[in-house]
Image: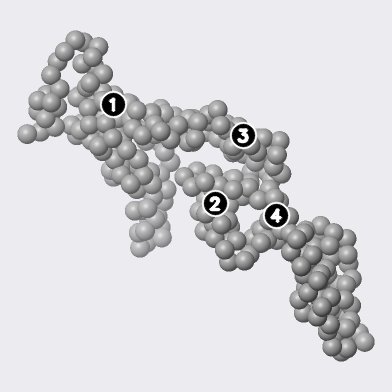
Amino acid sequence: MDANTSYAASEKPQNGDDDDISRQDFEKLLHGCEHYRRRCKLRTPCCDKIFTCRHCHNDATNALSNPKDRHDLVRSDVKEVICAVCGTEQQACNICSNCGVKFGEYFCDICKFYDDDITKKQFHCDDCGICRVGGRENFFHCPNCGSCYSMGLRNNHRCVQDSMKSHCPICYEFLFDSTKVTFILKCGHTMHKECYEEMLSQNQYHCPICSKSVFNMSDTWEMLDQEIEATAMPEEYRYDVSVLCNDCNNSSKTIFHILGHKCSHCGSYNTHVITSGENDR
């Protein structure tokens, strides 16, 4: 029994409108891949092969042994799709020209993006030029950073020009069209939230890009003050060093100590030694 026969046996004609709705919803959420639920596959114009989604394509092509063969799919370039129910190949659209099923409950003709799972609250951002998830009402587009952010960050984040059009400094995945949740650091740089949490679990508390502290470290600096005061250095190690502060970008002189060097301007210990007075004595 082919797909069309299976459909005919399971969907008896009723009145016209109800029959159209039943036909469009046939086998909803039953097709797709690990990334999306959809009732069509894409013919990729870049390599003329068939994949369920761009992530499936990119995973396969970027795993090829020859680096010259590796490439990503430009989603908007897709022109043809194959119905997952009846197998009919056709121009990219959202209703199968043969069996009448809907390829995706959510469909974006610009991105050629299909998804039957609309609980993700997909929406297309004209400024980003791609579809995003989470509900249009919950996001705003920051023109300086070049991406959509949650409403809680409106007028509440430091802008870095095109910060999202870069790679995560931890896993190096391109952030702009990543499906993972992103996180904006205090300095304005961005990374995946899961990469940020992994970084903190490794006791790394500074931005991998600019080295600024990722949050208010004043309590930690006070603890270091107490430890340094309680741990006297031997006489031969009591000399001044010049340090550059990663947090305030000022240089200053401080007394050398094995536990850390405090910035004289902002009190941060997120510093590095630039000159030592040890050899000048």
Task: Residue type at mark 1: give it.
Answer: Lys
Query: What mark, if any, has residue 192 been given in the picture?
Result: 2
Q: Nearer the viewer, mark 4 or mark 1?
A: 4
Residue beneath the point at 91% across and 84% down:
280
Q: Earlier in the sequence, mark 4 or mark 1?
A: 1
Between the residue at mark 2 and the residue at mark 1, the CA separation in whole angstroms equals 33 Å
Q: What's the residue type where badge 2 is placed?
A: His
Coordinates of residue 33 in the picture (x, y in percent): 30, 44
How far across and how far down the image is residue 157, in percent?
69, 42
- Amino acid identity at mark 4: Phe
Residue 63 in the image, given as x and y percentages of width and height: 37, 58
Q: Which mark is residue 215?
A: 4
Q: Quadrant of the C terminus?
A: bottom right
Q: Name the element at disc 2.
A: strand
Disc on the earlier residue, 4 or 3: 3
Q: Determine the CA span between mark 4 and mark 2.
A: 16 Å
The residue that mark 3 highlights is 151
| Residue name at image x 88 percent, y 60 percent | 265
- Quick check: 195 above or below 53? below
Foreground: 225 or 94? Answer: 225
Label 3: element kind: helix
Q: Are marks 2 and 3 in contact (CB under 8 Å)?
A: no
- Residue 102's tag is 1
Per the model, the C-alpha gap separating discs 1 and 3 is 32 Å
